[in-house]
Amino acid sequence: MAKEEPRPQPEAPRGVPADYPERWRRWTRWFRGRGSDRRVKALRAADKAIVVLFVAMYVLMAVGSARAMPAAIIGYVASTAACFVAMGLVRRWRNAPRPYEAFDIKPLVPKKDLKIGRSFPSRHAFCAFLIATMFAVVFRSFGGMVPLLLATALGVARVLEGVHFPRDVVAGAVLGVAAGFACIAAMVAV
């Protein structure tokens, strides 16, 4: 029987350190091992709950802006839709591999939920930070900061789950904040 050759480690994607798999394994050690099933389920549940909260915030802000300034709803929907489309085009053009594609790592998400490519920038981080930024600008009190903290938690969850590199989440966050301010400007202009 022939001895199986070890699989060569692929070259790290641009902007990702070559030792990323070891780093990721250190970060996720708590989610692997004894009793980890409950922790992984809690992480996934938190990810999904935060996404639902952001969808609800988006809808509530749309309803609120329609009531306050009926013309602003056009700017709100059109500007956010344009940002989402632009993000999709960037992801398609860049088509960056996900961590489990680039390295020999087993993500914490079920195999049926795994996607191929389009990792950079993170769409979850982009959408969360876009909505969080708009919320923070509209509600300038301390409560406006809560969505930014939730968006950060979502980004961390995406990295821990093994579906994004940190650079994907940071890029999505930066673009999301910029898009959030652009959407606010578009709403005010209408």
Image (cartoon, helix red, strand yellow):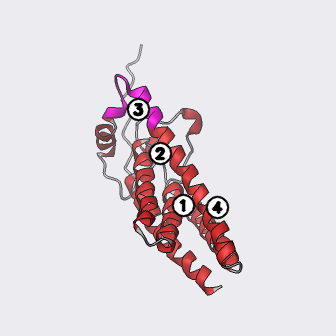
- Amino acid type of the residue tagged 1 in the rendering: Cys
- Amino acid type of the residue tagged 2 in the rendering: Val
Q: Quadrant of the C terminus?
A: bottom right
Please name whichever residue, 183 or 49, is drawn nearer the observer in this view of the structure: 49
**Tag 4, which secondary structure?**
helix
Residue beneath disc 1: 127
- Amino acid type of the residue tagged 4 in the rendering: Val
Residues at marks 2 and 3, CA–CA distance in whole angstroms: 17 Å
Q: Earlier in the sequence, mark 3 or mark 1?
A: 3
Viewed as shown, does residue 163 lie left or right of 24? right
Count residues near mark 3 (Cα–Cα under 10 Å), then give few for <14, some for 14-19, many for 20+: few
Residue beneath disc 3: 39
- Against 144, residue 110 (above or below) is above
State the image coordinates of residue 182 (x, y, percent, origin top left). 54, 78
Q: Earlier in the sequence, mark 1 or mark 2?
A: 1
State the image coordinates of residue 132 (x, y, percent, origin top left). 49, 64
Residue extending furthest toward the top? 1
Residues at marks 1 and 2, CA–CA distance in whole angstroms: 16 Å
Identified at 61% across, 86% down, the residue is 189
Residue 62 placement: quadrant: bottom right
Kindly report which numbered mark, 4 or 1, lies closer to the viewer in this rendering: 4
For residue 163, the mark is 2
Identified at 31% across, 48% down, the residue is 18
Residue 81 placement: quadrant: bottom right
Q: Earlier in the sequence, mark 4 or mark 1?
A: 4
